[in-house]
Amino acid sequence: MSTVTEIAEQIKNVDEYIVCIYAFNATGKTRLSVAYKDITKAENNGNHTGVYYNAYSEDLFDWDNDEDNDNFNIKLKIKFSSLNKFYNLLTEESVQEELLGYSPEYKFRFNSATNPEIGIESITFYLEEDEETSIKISRGEERIFIWCFFLALFKIEGWADKQNAHFFIDDPVSSLDDNNIFLTVDTIMQLIENSFETNRKIILTTHHIGLFAVLFDRLNKGEKSGRYKQNSKSFMLKKQGKDLELKEFKNEVFLFHLHLFQVLEDAKKSQLFTYHFVLLRQLLENIASFLGKSQIKFLLEEIKVDKPAETINMLNSLSHKKVFIPQINEMNEKEKAVFNEVFDKLLIKYNFKF
């Protein structure tokens, strides 16, 4: 078992230049990117050696809803940071080019600051047929836009080409549909391709199993896997109390639902906490999706849960917490009964082996 700093040191010492890491939410992926930054800066007289995309990147953007004017001038504001000096070199066209694959249904324009050192102050979104009415895009669209904003920023001279030892990307986008998973993998593969000749290290961490699985497949079995397979390693980052473990994937197949079963089986034998309902819900959604269903109600009825509606209510109330706040309360007897019923009936119905 290791600390987050020791895990960062392990990643830095990986010889392969493509490193993919899967981890559950709240494992410490963002802290890992910060620890990696601190280690590499300390070895370079306190100067950055690489560039990062993580939760802090997303935190640079927040909405001004212009509530005093009935949302008339709603816009996405950009907070001041060390990146502002590069914004004047960024164009709407360059960001639009990165967005093309995602087929956005909105248009946007940059609002420049009066102070040239700030560059872009905010971004206004609108529909093509009504340029004068500003709109607020969805959370999913916002995440994709910010990711594409940074993809364009990576190409600006003076930043990523100077701090060129590594890209560290933590959860580029979340809550993706299947099409957007493939599109996002395409953008990451393009980063890898552009960095191939320079041996710049690409480190990706994600809690999104679809994103991880598709990227793992591209690197190991895809059209260009002969080029990338020998230059990449994939890991799972696991949390045990306050300690972390980095486990390498080699030739084995990563079956996410079986991993979840194992985690929940171990917890069932030792101690169940309310956050295990989050993992149970992920397991149910994964199996339901495999069966071609979008709702877990179907699955609960399939396995003959006694009170499916009541069970869904409990799953919703205990799994829709803020994912970055670990739910450390021990389950009460009623919660344990519901958990055990669902878990045991899943095993009986589908006879999983793990």
Image (cartoon, rainbow, N blue to C red):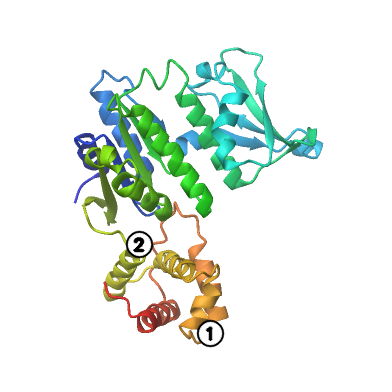
Q: Image height check: is 183 above or below 175?
A: above
Q: Residue 176: in sight, yes or no?
A: no
Place residue 104 in its image quadrant. Answer: top right
Q: Which residue of the protein is positioned furthest toward the top in this rendering?
A: 116
- Determine contact: label 2, label 1, CB under 8 Å: no
* Residue 253: x %, y % from top left: 28, 59
Residue that appears at 39% across and 79% down: 346
Q: Which residue is mark 2?
A: 256
* Residue 188: x %, y % from top left: 41, 38
* Residue 305: x %, y % from top left: 48, 84
Q: For the residues marked 2 and 1, what is the alpha-carbon distance in whole angstroms?
A: 27 Å
Task: Report how many numbered discs are placed on residues in the image.
Answer: 2
Q: Which mark is residue 187?
A: none
Is the residue marked by circle 1 packed among few (<14), some (14-19), or many (20+) residues within 10 Å? few
Along the viewing direction, whichever of 108 and 271 lies nearer the viewer: 108
Q: Give the amino acid at mark 2.
A: Phe
Is the residue marked by circle 2 packed among few (<14), some (14-19), or many (20+) residues within 10 Å? some
Residue that appears at 44% across and 77% down: 335
Left or right: residue 90 versus residue 161 is right
Q: Which residue is mark 1?
A: 307
Q: Residue 321: in sight, yes or no?
A: yes
Q: Give the amino acid at mark 1.
A: Lys
Q: Tag 1's secondary structure? A: loop
Q: Image height check: is 93 above or below 345?
A: above
